[in-house]
Amino acid sequence: MSTVKDLNHDGISNLLAIDEEYASPKSVAPNCLQQDFAGECKRSLQAPEDFWGDYALHFQWTKPWTKVLEWDGVHHQWFVGAKTNITINALDRHANSDRRNRAAFIWLGEDGSERIITYGQLHRQVCRFANGLKSLNVRKGDRVVIYMPLTIEGAIAMLACARIGAIHSVVYAGLGHTALRDRIVDAQAKIVIAGDVGFRRGKTVALKPIVDEALDTLDFVEKVVVFSRRAAEVGSAREIDFAELLKFPATCPAEEMDAEDPLFLLYTSGSTGKPKGVLHVHGGYMVGTTYHLENFFDVGEQDIFWCTSDIGWVVGHSYIVYAPLCAGATTLFREGAIDFPNPGTAWEIVERYGVTKMFTAPTALRMFMRYGEQYPAKYDLTSLKVIACAGEPLNPEAWRWAQTHLAGDGKWGYVVDNWWQTELGGPAIGTHPSMAMRPGKAGVAVPGCEADVVNEEGKSCAPGVGGRLVLKRPFPYMLRTVWRDPARYERDWEQIPGCYVTGDVALKDKDGYITVLGRADDVLNVAGHRIGTAEIESALVSHPAVAEAAAIGIPDPLKGETIKVFVQTRADHVPSEALSATLIEHVRRELGPIATPSALEFVASLPKTRSGKILRRFLKAKETGKDAGDVSTMEG
Ligand code: AMP
């Protein structure tokens, strides 16, 4: 792993000279704007136990905690001794109230199909399926791998596991058989719940053959529950039809769980290294993710919230399934590609359903930018108050484009960035709707979170000086350990004293806004200057001909590394040598001579993980003839 010990100040601080600020359009987020955000941040750090303890009282617990936090510097426990089950708060609380007939989920298919399920109905379906799982001898603590298309049934499978205390591990239904197999083996899953097909870009994607191949010779898997949409015959004796499990009684008391009992394992997307099984728990995860949904993204009971992620990723766990249900909101989600059948599809949906808040990724915004503003311009998007964006650096140009064309230049909405990881379960850095947005900067540490940029000794870097992005204390929704590899978890707390090392490189401005420069492993070293991939890529994307870009370092005997960039042009621009020269010159002007790319290659598309992150590691391996490491989550 590369270090940032020799991080060159001149290199970085001069490079990221973007100094724009856009004031919050104050009317966009009426709920969370009532709070004093700076005050919340301060209180959460001064009195974390009171802060989280007070908020946790919003939830139903079957036994109260004796202590809010126990932390030994590495391991942390929250709401010690308390008992609950996340599904009591996600389902029973609403199903037993006058909210029972409100829509919990609106599901959409690419072919225009729509399904709406109320809190009351969802509660019954989850209970039925939970009883079905019990009939298969699934018990508290057992692992269940879920390989399902983005459907209501996928969410039911997750919630039913949680209901009976089984630990689910969702694998994105798009990963190949090796990735699926590795995860089933690592989790030692007793049961696999899988779809027969998914639908994407008008095509039927066969999932069952992938499952069959992954499961071949894995005898410890006792049953495979098949969610069949193509009337596929249930095959071997090990298989059982999903529909059979929905025939069980609609009452199933929630298993009483310790606040610290595992809720799920989720293997990280693999943008670096070998995937790891991140473990999240019932209590703290519920409290923390819901806190941020309500108070950071401003989502509550009145909202139609569209999260464009998938249940295969952490954003989908937290912000399609668990937190919106705990908050009593209506979540809209859609199977398939967001730009299919046409580039205006997303905006047609926003208009039709009156979507109020949206959670999406930079890769989607860059894609919309590539298509052009004529598509959103056709629809009424004025319902859309907050567009939160996470997963990768949000390039300033993509932010400006989205703020102008999706949020009406602030007349009705606001595009805000937030930074987190699978390990964290929810946001740790971000721009609250009441704050000014500084393009190129993810924002500040959110309430409950103490983020800093430090050198290898753990000393805070001065503003504008790059270093490691660390967290200086745990928060309730952060991972508890790495499944079957606790040492891997402990290492992240032990590399730098008193810090959880996130693996990202960043810099902070004088007001605490943080710019994430990229993964430490991706940061380039050109003639002794450390340069973030995010800076070079954002400089390229700021040119009107560029839709997306990736930067990598190529080993060079003289300079250490030289920069090679890969560029995908916007719809109305054609690659040419002249354009290549213009773009290289553009980067030189924006960032200075040391950041000038030595080579530029136009590509039709960039290699990405299935969650939409650019796989620089793969590009670099191809260029240098080295092994790309784990690429199991790469888009096929
Ligand atoms: P994953 O756990 O696979 O979702 O990846 C987490 C990583 O994505 C982080 O460590 C960052 O490198 C990157 N990331 C997530 N959100 C942002 C953001 N808002 N800005 C920059 N990078 C981000």
Image (cartoon, rainbow, N blue to C red):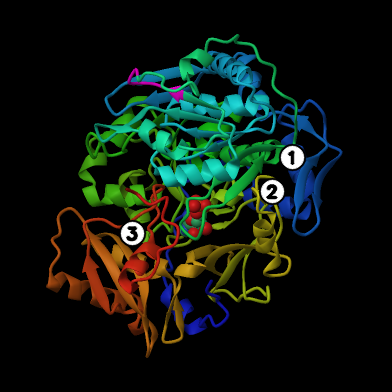
Q: Give the residue type that dot 1 points to.
A: Glu
Q: Residues within 10 Å of mark 1 (few under 14, many from 20)?
A: many
395 or 422: which is nearer to us? 422
Q: For marks 1 and 3, give the CA distance.
A: 42 Å
Say how many tags the image has: 3
Figure check: 204 above or below 570: above
Q: Position of residue 621 (x, y in %)?
A: 36, 68
Question: Mark 3 or mark 2, which is nearer to you?
Answer: 2
- In-image side of 313 versus 501 (left or right): left
Pointer 2 and pointer 1: residues touching (CB < 8 Å)? yes
Q: Quadrant of residue 174?
A: top left
The residue that disc 3 covers is 397
Mark 3 closeness class: few <14, some 14–19, many ≥20 residues within 10 Å:
many
Q: What SS does tag 3 mark? A: helix
Q: Where, by quadrant of the figure, is residue 234 drawn?
A: top left
The answer to whether the residue labelled 3 contacts the one labelled 2, judged by CB atoms less than 8 Å apart, is: no
Give the label, 1 or 3, closer to the camera: 1
Q: Are marks 1 and 3 in contact (CB under 8 Å)?
A: no
From the image, give the main secondary structure of the stretch colored magenta.
Answer: loop
Provide the residue designation for mark 2. 480
Tell me the residue at 71%/24% (across/down). 255
Residue nearest the observer in this picture, 152 or 195: 195
